Image: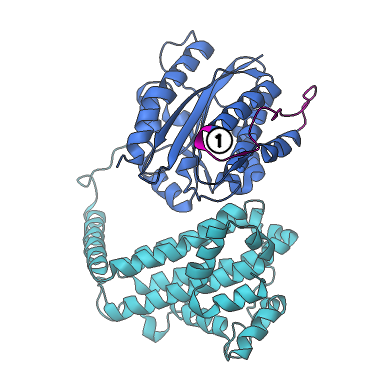
Amino acid sequence: MISMAAIRNEFLEELWLPLIIEGGIQFYPALRKNKKMKTLVFTDESLYQEIITIINARITNEDNVFAWTDTLFKTSRLQTYRPVKVVGSSRFEDSAQENIITLSSNFPFDILSIDFSCQNVQDEPQRLEKELDCIEQIIKVQREKISIGGFVLFYTTFLGSHPLSSNEIKQSSDSIRIENWNGLSTNILPNNAISDDDKMKVIECTIFQFAQKHRLTVNLKKRVSNFNPNNKKLYSIGGIFKVV
Amino acid sequence: MPRFTVKGLGTETKSIYQHQLTWGRNNWHESLTQHATEIEQLMNKLSTLEIWNSKLQSSPAAKELIPEIWMDNYVSITLACIGLYKHATMSLRSSLETGLRLVYFFQHPIEYSWWKKGSRFGQDRERHDVWGPSYEYFGLLFSEFENECIKDGKDLFKQQKCLPTLYNSLSGSIHTQAKRLQTTSGYSPKYNRAKFCEWKEFFFITNTYLNIILTLGFPNQFKNLLASDKSKIIDIGIGDYYNDKVKKILRE
């Protein structure tokens, strides 16, 4: 059985790191090394390989890494072993609005790895819808704090066994009003996505539209991998979001 | 920044450092050899606090006090495992006290701001805390639950006073009652099965009561939890004796 750490390493090597490096070149072309890109990482105290890798690649340094973990146990251990700033110790989507307020003084970030798979994910109905709502709220705050350039953002999660409702996503998203935006278009998407392929299609289309809504362009890239024999799939999608 | 070396320490400082590392390590090993499974169970029980921590982030009181409750319990495990049973129990009383205050302050943000500024609000000469004499506040707030327990011959606040009994028992360590003396068996703390088991029971009950108080204190937040989180609080956090009563009160 392939381990979670091995999958995340694969994602890191093949998706996250190349996009982060590319983002660094585009947003900080004058700095060849030691870019010190401000980074928000949802991490697990035993799986913080992504933090070590991007620090070793001289994309950022410990002073510019802000970690979010889902428990007080993990925070305590992370603070013991890695001298990074831990900005949150709760399951993010449980109190998304309050958590974004908590983080607000730290925005904007250059890199955001919003990895819900680190958060002791429970396979419950409406989980993906809630996570996507968090993603939009984060993109919204990012966009409010920048007028030029952009950022690199990844969304990582388990696809899970429950259907994904594009109507639910639309309802949450449309409650976040933006001038000249007529609402999320879900016409071409299955309302209740059941298969993993359909879920991935809905997620990709949704994030693409979040970017458009908040006046950003993005070319999304993704990876998916089977986690265990129960066919639990870990999915990551991300890209370089640029201000229009 | 200066680097730490043992060599550079003064004689007495070096001695206390090495001495404490030695008995600390030995007692950890002995405690885990005898009780590793139980420690795992207690850690699991403590992890129910994480659910409350995630759910109650909108309250400034919860945001600050839940990590403190967690840390008191976490440190209590450490202290018990290195053989400091009196101190481990002191830490449990601190966690219980903070948990009780949390339920009150959640509903009373103005009083919370006074308390944060150092006011000894609510602590009158009879040493009652914000919950009033005989846990009056909780007795009234959770009267339906209390009546359910009384029907069953056991209660939390009023007649047999399970919670006050626990609180007073834990206080025995804070006020160093004779049976809680740390140094009776020597000056180098040692693993002691009876004392470990007594502490383990205190830990278990303290965390059971904390979960009852939080569940009854935040019923709407409890109802909005994920099904798996509710089950964890009911089955592991509260456990066998009180879980049916809590479910009945919350219509779960």
In magenta segment, residue A188: yes
Which residue is disc 1 drawn over? A199
Name the foreground residue: A164 vs B237: A164
Q: Is residue A185 above or below residue B79?
A: above
Name the foreground residue: A174 vs B219: A174
Give the SS element for disc 1: helix
Query: x, y (%) of residue A84?
Result: 44, 36
Query: x, y (%) of residue B59?
Result: 66, 54
Q: Residue furthest top?
A: A30
At label 1, the amino acid type is: Lys
Please state the extent of the stretch shown in magenta in the rendering.
A177-197
In the rendered structure, the colour chosen for chain B is cyan
Residue B182 appears in the rendering: no
In the rendered structure, the colour chosen for chain A is blue
Q: Chain of mark 1?
A: A
Residue lying at 71% horizontally and 29% vertically, measured from the top left: A184
Residue A216: quadrant of the picture: top right
Residue lying at 43% horizontally and 53% vertically, measured from the top left: A73
Which quarter of the figure is the C terminus of chain B placed in? bottom right
- Dominant secondary structure, magenta: loop
